Image (tube, grey):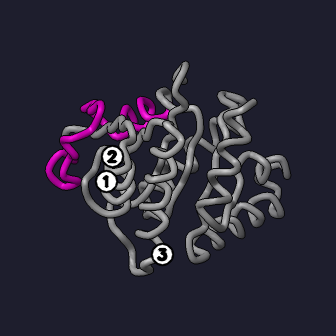
Amino acid sequence: MSSSTPSICVFCGARAGVDPAYVADAQAMGRAIAERSWRLVYGAGDVGLMGEVARACIGAGGDSFGVIPTHLMQGEVAKRDLGTLVITETMHERKKVMFSNSDAIVVLPGGAGSLDEFFEVLTWRQLGLHTRPIFVLNSGGYWTPLAALVEHIIAQGFADPSLRGFFTLCDSVEEVVAGLEGALAQ
């Protein structure tokens, strides 16, 4: 974890999605990170929601730390104006570097990669490997089915009810920011 400047790891899609709320929330999240002098840690892409959150953060004067594997340098168009750019060999290494350089995790809408990232940090939390707060921004209800899936997993006996307490589903950027401020103040 970082020492003086809180770092917020944002997991999100390399696509923009169909609902304009996804882009608007990604931009608002990027600006909020910059306005609080936090550092954005993200997947270093310049496309989709990744690009939106980074452009908004950097445009508002924020610091950024991007991590991208070599095989995605072209497809995700690695952003070059980042404060720090780390190039990894594998996707797993990318997640590890992002996580290791963050104090909190925020999950915006995304696809299979974002689900992979979310479930990995959730599993690590469940196993007691970290205590970082995890916030899931439910832009336009995007993650409501995910919350239902977690409830189903608990109901079917594959996880303890404590699983639901390892992440916070938020309906607005403001709610995420308030949660982050509270968590980072501890």
- Indicate the secondary structure of the residue bearing disc 2: helix
Check the image and name the residue furthest to the top: 3
Q: Is disc 3 surrounded by few (<14), some (14 to 19) or many (20+) residues within 10 Å?
A: some
User: Is residue 58 toward the left or the right of residue 80 in the image?
Assistant: right
Q: Which mark is residue 21?
A: 3
Which of 32 and 43 lies nearest the eye of the viewer? 32
Kindly identify the residue that appears in the image at 36 percent across and 35 percent down: 65
Quarter residue 128 falls in: top right
Check the image and name the residue furthest to the left: 74
Q: Quadrant of the N terminus?
A: top right
Q: CA distance from mark 3 to mark 2?
A: 20 Å
Q: Which residues are magenta?
A: 72-99
Task: Say which amino acid is labelled 1.
Answer: Arg
Q: Is residue 130 above or below residue 166?
A: above
- Does 96 appear in magenta? yes
**Between disc 1 and disc 3, whose residue precedes?**
3
Q: Quadrant of the C terminus?
A: top right
Mark 1, residue position: 55
Task: Say which amino acid is labelled 3.
Answer: Ala
Q: Is disc 2 surrounded by few (<14), some (14 to 19) or many (20+) residues within 10 Å?
A: many
Mark 2, residue position: 58
Q: Which mark is residue 98?
A: none
Residue 143: give x, y in percent of width and height: 60, 68
Kindly identify the residue that appears in the image at 41 percent across and 29 percent down: 97
Q: CA distance from mark 2 to mark 1?
A: 5 Å
User: Is residue 39 toward the left or the right of residue 148 in the image?
Assistant: left
Residue 88 in view, yes or no: no
